[in-house]
Image (cartoon, rainbow, N blue to C red):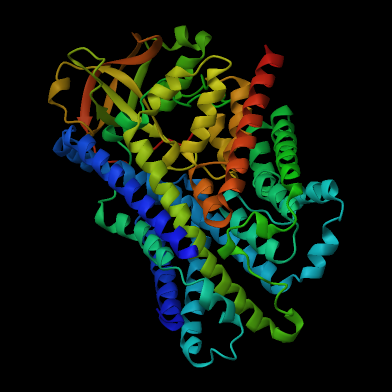
């Protein structure tokens, strides 16, 4: 039974691969390949500079996230997490959306940390709230936003709306019983299957720190590959697609929001510094567009999308992208309506 | 791959990454990639990468022998050997070594856009009239031009700016743009700004050549924007400055 299903799906795969290959050959034979290659080569330095720019800027924040994950694994036990999170789903989600204050991570660090917290017994919905809100609702991001925009409505709007969207999206996940239902099967570290106290002897601080470093290294590679792939994609898009066109398209109250949402994804800037970047756009784009950028960018960009797909199952990722997208769009449009 | 080899490779690449970053810091090229304010974070990263790298490398020695007792690695060793992780972590190093480092210049403008719409006017930037006009850089001039009241006052002042040569297709013969990239956070958010230069020998200037332009400031209509223009009295080639970008 299973084998026939397998062979069926295998033969279907083959058909798809063949069709794609034929299409590729047709498309490429129509293009001036040599010219394109030369052009690509000419853009290589731009690609390299932008790619390394994103990478070098992200490394400290990725390290913070992976060390945080190592710290949680080694020093925080399951009971403490379960005591921290209220049983009531809504309260749990609210607490989850504010956990970033304890774990100040940006969107590169939040994915490994969330997975770790799941394995330590954090409920699915609360974890989703943490995943979406923590990159904004944390001391570093709050301070940098305040430094860029002052302690005004932009800061309040950013924190408030990010939490609102995180909580609303997380409540959709409240139907899910266990984190196992949102994670990819391979990502679910079956913690409760192993009676921890028997297996984990009390170890010296030195041993614990060593263990923490090893976990940090593991996750640096595991998460880093998506960060690097995402940075490469973002850099390639920047080197090849004129952003000028994008900037000039979007001045209206609606298009400006759409353009800034697109920029948030393409630029893939760390949530702890994006406020400084968007500051430069204030004079060009509508306030709603700026706010939409500040809300949506930390939740979804090229590298986080890749990281989401590496940890969560497809359906969860689709929810995690679509709901924040729609709600950020709505928030941006409403702000523009109110301001106008 | 055995766990032992994996740990060795992990540690090795972490240490290589630290050396790579250190080399960027020491060569003074780090601000081709990120805003100088993030330099301390990169220094910190070098230290952390070295520490983790050495610890992981050393844990490779014990990984082979005591697999039964070494609880640390019990879980990792089935789930976490990530060959792709190792390969991808080499990518920044390869790109850094194989593609000659270069700050953003003319060829980046085609992709990233050139514009007076570039984010130059930060929200509360103070227009500095007090500044001697000779000391203003291209960004200062753009800020002055973005505020309508300032515009009248600065026309006719003398300018003395540096930048690289960009031949914009929108310009007439005998004109080019003297340009800089502005970077707020990292090269990913770099946008070009520039001033039009009237200079009879424009055509002989190679693109990307760094130059010092002296002359008198006027304005010119380019598209739907008013751009600063320099009636150049001298254009001399210079070395690439220590900091090619402007940091608003």
- Give percent across and percent down for residue B232: 25, 18
Q: What is the x, y in percent for residue B212?
A: 27, 30
Position of the N terminus of chain B, as image quadrant, is bottom left
Position of residue B135 measured from the top left corner of the image (x, y, whole percent): 41, 28
Residue at image position (57%, 91%) is B68
Figure quadrant of residue B90? bottom left
Viewed as shown, does residue A255 lie left or right of A178? left
Residue A283 seen anywhere in this rendered image of the structure:
no
Quadrant assignment, res B223: top left
List x then y, in percent, for residue B69: 60, 91
Q: Can residue A37 be seen in this view?
A: yes
Residue closest to the eye, A5 or B64? A5
Q: In this view, does B205 lie above or below A207?
A: above
Q: How many marks?
A: 0
- At x 50%, y 63%, the residue is A1
**In the rendered image of this protein, does residue B234 appear above or below residue A119?**
above
Q: Which of B232 and A167 is in front in this view?
A: A167
Query: What's the residue at 47%, 54% (across, down)?
Result: A226
Q: In this view, does A3 lie to the left or right of B107?
A: right
Judge from the rendering whether residue B124 lies leftward or rightward of residue B186; answer left or right.
right
Q: In which quarter of the image is residue A249?
A: top left
């Amino acid at each position: 039974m299973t084998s026939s299903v397998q062979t069926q799906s295998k033969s279907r795969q083959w058909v798809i691969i063949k069709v794609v290959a034929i299409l590729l050959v047709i498309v490429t034979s129509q293009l001036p390949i040599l010219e394109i290659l030369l052009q690509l080569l000419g853009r290589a330095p731009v690609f390299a500079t932008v790619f390394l720019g994103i990478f070098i800027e992200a490394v400290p924040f990725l390290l913070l996230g992976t060390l945080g994950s190592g710290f949680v694994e080694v020093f925080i036990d399951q009971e403490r997490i379960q005591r921290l999170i209220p049983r009531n789903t809504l309260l749990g989600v609210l607490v989850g959306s504010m956990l970033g204050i304890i774990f100040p991570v940006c969107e590169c660090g939040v994915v490994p940390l969330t997975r770790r917290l799941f394995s330590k017994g954090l409920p699915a919905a609360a974890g989703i709230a943490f995943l979406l809100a923590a990159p904004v609702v944390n001391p570093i991001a709050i301070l940098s936003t305040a430094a860029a925009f002052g302690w005004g409505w932009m800061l309040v709007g950013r924190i408030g709306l990010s939490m609102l969207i995180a909580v609303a999206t997380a409540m959709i996940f409240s139907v899910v019983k266990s984190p196992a239902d949102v994670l990819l099967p391979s990502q679910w570290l079956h913690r409760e299957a192993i009676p921890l106290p028997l297996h984990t002897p009390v170890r010296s601080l030195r041993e614990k720190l060593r263990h923490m470093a090893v976990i940090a290294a593991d996750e640096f590679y595991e998460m880093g590959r998506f960060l690097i792939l995402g940075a490469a994609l973002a850099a390639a898009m920047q080197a090849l697609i004129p952003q000028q066109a994008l900037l000039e398209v979007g001045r209206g109250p609606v298009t400006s929001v759409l353009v800034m949402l697109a920029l948030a994804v393409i630029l893939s800037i760390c949530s702890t510094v994006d406020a400084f970047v968007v500051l430069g756009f204030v004079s060009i784009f509508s306030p709603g567009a700026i706010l939409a950028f500040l809300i949506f960018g930390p939740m979804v960009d090229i590298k986080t999308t890749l990281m989401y797909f590496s940890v969560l199952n497809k359906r969860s990722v689709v929810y995690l992208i679509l709901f924040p997208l729609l709600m950020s769009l709505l928030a941006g449009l409403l702000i523009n309506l109110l301001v106008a | 791959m055995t766990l032992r080899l994996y740990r060795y490779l992990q540690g090795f690449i972490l240490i290589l990454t630290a050396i790579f970053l250190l080399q960027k810091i020491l060569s003074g090229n780090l601000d081709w990639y990120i805003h100088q304010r993030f330099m301390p974070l990169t220094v910190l990263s070098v230290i952390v990468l070295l520490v983790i790298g050495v610890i992981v490398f050393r844990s490779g020695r014990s990984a082979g022998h005591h697999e039964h007792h070494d609880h640390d690695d019990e879980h990792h060793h089935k789930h976490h050997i990530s060959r792709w992780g190792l390969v991808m972590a080499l990518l920044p190093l390869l790109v850094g070594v194989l593609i000659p480092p270069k700050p953003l210049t003319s060829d980046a403008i085609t992709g990233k856009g050139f514009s007076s719409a570039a984010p130059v006017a930060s929200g509360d930037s103070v227009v500095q009239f007090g500044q001697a006009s000779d000391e203003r850089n291209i960004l200062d001039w753009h800020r002055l031009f973005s505020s309508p009241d300032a515009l009248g006052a600065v026309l006719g002042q003398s300018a003395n700016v540096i930048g690289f040569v960009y031949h914009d297709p929108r310009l007439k013969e005998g004109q080019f743009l003297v340009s800089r990239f502005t970077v707020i956070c990292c090269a990913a958010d770099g946008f070009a700004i520039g001033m039009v230069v009237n200079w009879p020998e424009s055509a002989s200037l190679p693109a990307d050549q760094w130059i010092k332009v002296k002359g008198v400031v006027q304005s010119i209509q380019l598209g739907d924007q008013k751009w600063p223009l320099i009636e150049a009295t001298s254009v001399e080639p210079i070395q690439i400055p220590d900091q090619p970008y402007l940091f608003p």
